[in-house]
Every structure is written in C-alpha cells, then in structure tokens.
Amino acid sequence: MSAVVPEVSERKQAFAKRLAIAIVAIALVGLPLLFSQLTIYRLGVVLIFVVAAIGLHILVNWAGELSLCHAGMVGVPAFVVAGLSERFDVSPLLLVPAGLVVGAGVGAIVALPALRAKGLQVALVTFAVGIAINSYFFNQSWLVGPASGRQAAVPSLGRLTFNTSKSLYPVVGGLFVLIVLATWGLYRSRVARAMLWVKADPEAAAVFGIQVRFYRILAYVLAGAFAGLSGSLTVVWTRVVSAQSFPTTLSFTYLLVVVIAGTGFVGGVIVIGGLLEGGALFISSAATWINYMGPIGLVLSLTANKNGINGAMRQVLSRFEPSEPVALDCVLDEMSPDAESDLDSDLRRRRRNSRWSTLAGRRG
C-alpha cells in the first residue's frame, strides 16, 4: 500500500504540471489578443527574439561552446526566406522550414573553424565570422536586395490571409509554444545529457563512448536551426528585413541573455529575454537602465550566482516540492540534466580534493 501512495502522488504532480503548462500556453496565445495592434506587434518581436536566444542557450549553457556571430546566423536565413518569398510570391510561413535548414547549415559552417580553436580563440573566430557576414554578405544585393531591404509576401495559409498582427499572432504564438515544447523534449533526451557531459569533462565523456566532436558540431547546428527559425519568423512578422535588422551588436545581446539565464531549461532565457527586449520595446526609458542592468547582471551571474536565473528558479521551486526518501538508483535514473551535471561536478571536485590530499600525505 505504501508503494501505491507515492505513485498516485507522482501522477497528481505530473497532471498538475501538464495542466499548468496548458494554461500558460493558452494564456500566452489568447490573452494578448485583447491588446492593441502595437502591443501585439511588440510582443511578437519579443517572442521571436527569445527563439534565437534559445538556440544560443543550447550552444553555450548546454554544450559549453561559444558564438559571437549569432546575429549573422539569424540574418542569413531571414534574407533567404525573404528573397524566396519576394521573388516567387510565396507565403513566408511556408518557407519557415527552409529557413530552419539554412540556419542549421550556417551553424555547421561556423562550427568548422570554431572547433579548431580553444578558449579565447573561439570568441575571436566566431566574432570574425560575424563581422564577415555583416560586412560582406549583408552588403550583397543578391542576398539583401535594395537598400530598403527585402519585402516578403503577405503571410497566408491556404485561404487564410494574415494582414494584421492580431490575426497573425495566434500562429506565431502557437509556433513559439511548439518550439518551447520541442526544446523541453530535447532537454530531457540523451542528446542534452551528452552535451552536458562534453561541457563538464570532454575526456571523461570520450571514455564513456560519447562522440565529443559530433556533439560539439551538433550544438552549433542546433543553434543555427533555432536562429533560422527566428530569422524566418522575423520575416513572417515584419515582412521587411534589411541589413540594419541584424547588427553585430545584437550577438552580444543574445550572449548577455543566455549568460544571465544560466544552465538549465529555457525559463531563464524567456525571463531575461523578455526583460531586456521587452523592456526596450514597451518602456521608452528602458534603454538607459538596460545599458546598466544588463552588464551588472552579467557580472553577478559570473561571480555571485554562477547558476544564473535558472539556478535561482530551481532553488525557489525546490522549496515547494515534498521531500521523500528515494533509492539512489531511482534518483540516478530520473535525474535531470541539471542535477546530473551538478553531480558530475561534485564528483570531480571530490576526486580532485582527494588527489591533492594524497599528494600532500606523500610529501609529508
């Protein structure tokens, strides 16, 4: 009987979580329709910004890699989708998969030089790639079109035409929810666990049969795919894109968001991305305090709170979860990627301390 009670409790908790997720998803898609066209348009811009930040979050916080050319990875697929839509008069909604593929390809290309670099060299290499994209490709008329930019066709699905932000928002909001759910599935998969292993200790991961090089490349491909989704949705939402839409400085904004968010799921990315991008759009005077609060948050995340907003959110949520005695093997089987990474770090720290103690004993 005692074994049945925890099982029923777990089922209730799982049902409550699914119900909460469904309510949040419905609210995210439905409630904004009560607002004005301008408010809905700004909210759509924030959601699309977060999609791109999620890709960099996977690259940096899951795989331990780095990219300072993320704005270029968003821009190239955007111009490809806008160009195809403009030339063939095709709805940009139908070209979103094409943008995803182009973004993944750009990510794979960026991975080639990045994998040959180490430490600070990775930042320099990816920054150089970003400058090359911005200085060369974003000045080519065959890609970006005239100085005014590319003008995509009106978004449509079959007989449905979306002429306003209010009519288009349920589609973009629904796609955002699907992207977050897909990221959750990825987060609970072996792929995320392998990336966290590679981030924590590449040599140990290789010993256990994890193909380190493959997962490092995959991280860049996934980051590019999310960037491609963001670029495609930018075309769908704004219909007009130009070289000024993707400045090099935007890459640093994405990086600022993911560093403050910290390791974990995308909750921290949504919060910080919404504050930074949403604050600049919804509050006219927000640009000033964002210029100060962003760097301050970055310093605090790198020094005082290395787990970022995600770590702080986990600590708060853990206080509301009932503590029950569970067997160690069950814990290891059901361990989340975050806990698995923390356990691995703890084991490596203890092993290092033990090694130093042994050496000190021998010297003594």
Image (spheres, helix red, strand yellow):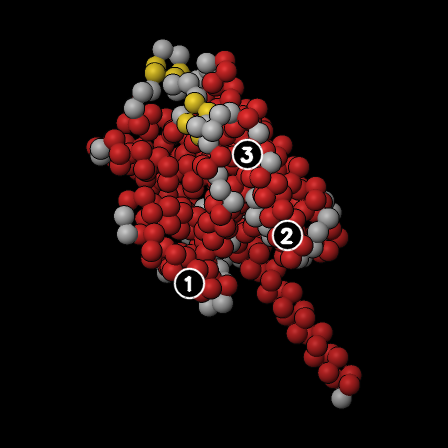
Q: Is residue 326 visible?
A: yes
The one of 326 and 345 positioned closer to us in this rendering: 345
Q: Disc 1 or disc 3, which is closer to the eye?
A: 3
Disc 3 marks which amino acid?
Answer: Phe
Query: Residue tagged by mark 3?
Result: 138
Identified at 39% across, 20% down, the residue is 155
Labels 3 and 2: the sequence-earlier one: 2
Identified at 48% across, 19% down, the residue is 85
Disc 1 marks which amino acid?
Answer: Ile
Q: Secondary structure at mark 1?
A: helix
Query: Residue tagged by mark 1?
Result: 296
Query: Residue tagged by mark 2?
Result: 124
Circles 3 and 2: CB atoms closer than 8 Å: no
Labels 1 and 2: the sequence-earlier one: 2
The one of 305 and 233 positioned closer to us in this rendering: 233
Identified at 47% across, 18% down, the residue is 86
The one of 53 and 141 positioned closer to us in this rendering: 141
Residue 333, horizontal then vertical, whole percent: 57, 50
**Alpha-carbon span between mark 1 and mark 2:** 23 Å
Instruction: Give the residue furthest to the bottom.
Output: 364
In the image, residue 124 above or below residue 105: below
Identified at 46% across, 32% down, the residue is 242
Name the image quarter holding the C terminus.
bottom right
In screen coordinates, is 204 left or right of 137?
A: right
Few, some or many C-alpha atoms within 10 Å of disc 2 (few <14, some 14-19, many ≥20)?
some
Q: Secondary structure at mark 3?
A: helix
Quadrant of residue 148 in the image? top left
